[in-house]
Image: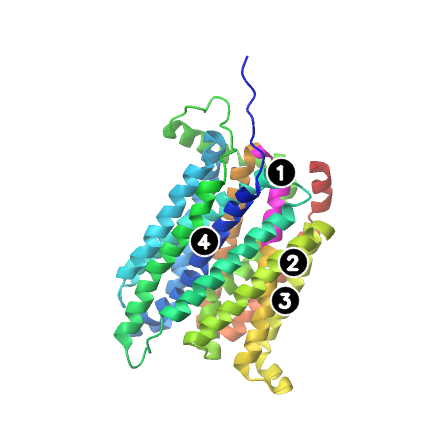
Amino acid sequence: MNNPITVPPVKKREIFGWAMYDFANSSYTTVVVTFIYSAFFVSYIVPPELAHMKNTFWSLAVAISTALAIVLAPLVGVLCDYSGKKKKYLAVCTFTSIFATAALFFVEPGQIWIGLTLLVFSNTAWMLSESFIASFLPELATKKNMGKISGFGWGIGYIGGLLSLLIMAGFITADKVTDFDLFVNQNQLAMVFIALFYFLGALPTFLFVKERAIAKPGYEQASFKQLSTAAVKRVLDMKNIIGDYPVLFKFFLAFMMYSAGIAVVVKFFGIYAQEEIGINGTALLLIGATLQVSSMLGAICFGFIEDKIGSKQTIFLSLGWWITGILGIYFLDPLVSMTGMEINKLFVVVAFIAGSAMGATQSASRAVVGLLAKPEDSALLFGLWGTFGRFAIIIGMTFGPISDSIGRHSGLLFILVYFIIGGVMLAFVPLNKALAQRH
């Protein structure tokens, strides 16, 4: 007779360790993707003779890495579920992203394709790790506290993003006009610092979070080849997976649409602030810090609200908040005339509004998956959650060529379309009924 498998109780330090991964990997998306390296790449890595395609080059790096994550996320998710080794695959993705980020130090102005290659490796691994750390959520939380714990993790993540930005503010100090070589060197060396930040921040995750996943019967001693074959077979059986989770897949489609709008904001916020509003250097970092603080507050506060009013209502509320923020940016000049405020200060106010919605929307969406996923499918479903989120990025990256052709300001209206369509689709998802049945 087999002895029953004892699942260890969840301790507070595990929840802290899990949340610290959000703290760690937020430094990557904040500094590399949103504020620092994105603006540095389009302005200085892309040479002047190709400046008319700089947004397209950045979109290409994001799109390629996203396409790879789309293919790999569900496959590696099944590997995790079948092998019961989530932490192992999380570690592989984590250190791949860290090493590729540090290697950006060696990319010189004009070396577009080297930079693109390293960005693809680092961003693909980062996106996969985001899905896999999320798959631990159902094991650490209950129906009653899923929103709070997800929101806590996302909120801690924004603290990591804020701290990494403050470090960059104190590190990147050279004037790009009077001391160009030092300015470039500081931006390169910043990637090494962020890689180290990522590594140190993620250590509590691997030290404190226990591996609760159990290998699928018959796969306890399976080789990687056997696991890979099973993973491909399972993913190709998508019809049955959808049949097991019909409401969740309807939610994934709505999530994909409104996440396309979020993707544009995340990937182009720093570029828009620098090239449209004229905010540079320390001022850009301070606005980024404001966005991180508001996102942290939004994630934590909306997490408590979510456990009271439900995930669906929370997402609707956050989408309305998004629309308000984007309209504020679009009508920034008339608002400046009406209020008499300086455009930079008013932009900070609008960024605060938009940032509050960012953490809330993403955290509530993650909690929905945690509430509906069965333990034996958690990594697969969070991998698919990541896959639909990556499809959203590809949809959102149409903003690059669109903004190159009609201008970034007019392109803001396309972001509104994503949020509105996503909200309408969400209205037809019987999410509350499915959550009631699940529990």
Q: Vertical placement of 428 versus 291: above or below?
A: above
Marks 3/1: CA–CA distance:
30 Å
Give the residue at mark 4. 25
Range covered by the magenta-colored residues: 363-375
Q: Mark 2 vs mark 4: which is more N-terminal?
A: 4
From the viewer's perspective, tell me whether residue 138 is left or right of residue 305: left
Marks 4/3: CA–CA distance:
27 Å
From the viewer's perspective, tell me whether residue 324 is left or right of residue 215: right
Give the residue at mark 1. 245
Q: Vertical placement of 106 versus 82: above or below?
A: below
**Residue 72 covered by magenta stretch:** no
Q: Mark 1 vs mark 4: which is more N-terminal?
A: 4
Residue type beneath disc 4: Asn
Marks 2/4: CA–CA distance:
21 Å
- Taking depth in this image into account, of 63 and 104 the one nearest to the observer is 104
Marks 2/1: CA–CA distance:
29 Å
Answer yes or no: do the residues labelled 3 and 2 have beta carbons within 8 Å? no
Answer yes or no: do the residues labelled 1 and 4 have beta carbons within 8 Å? no
Residue 190 at x, y = what percent? 34, 63
Q: Residue at x 46, y 37 (%)?
A: 86
Q: Residue at x 54, y 55 (%)?
A: 156
Give the residue at mark 2. 301
Q: Mark 4 vs mark 3: which is more N-terminal?
A: 4
**Residue 369 appears anywhere in the view:** yes
Residue 140 at x, y = what percent? 58, 40
Answer yes or no: do the residues labelled 3 and 1 have beta carbons within 8 Å? no
| Disc ID at residue 432 | none
Give the residue at mark 3. 323
Q: Residue at x 52, y 38 (%)?
A: 379
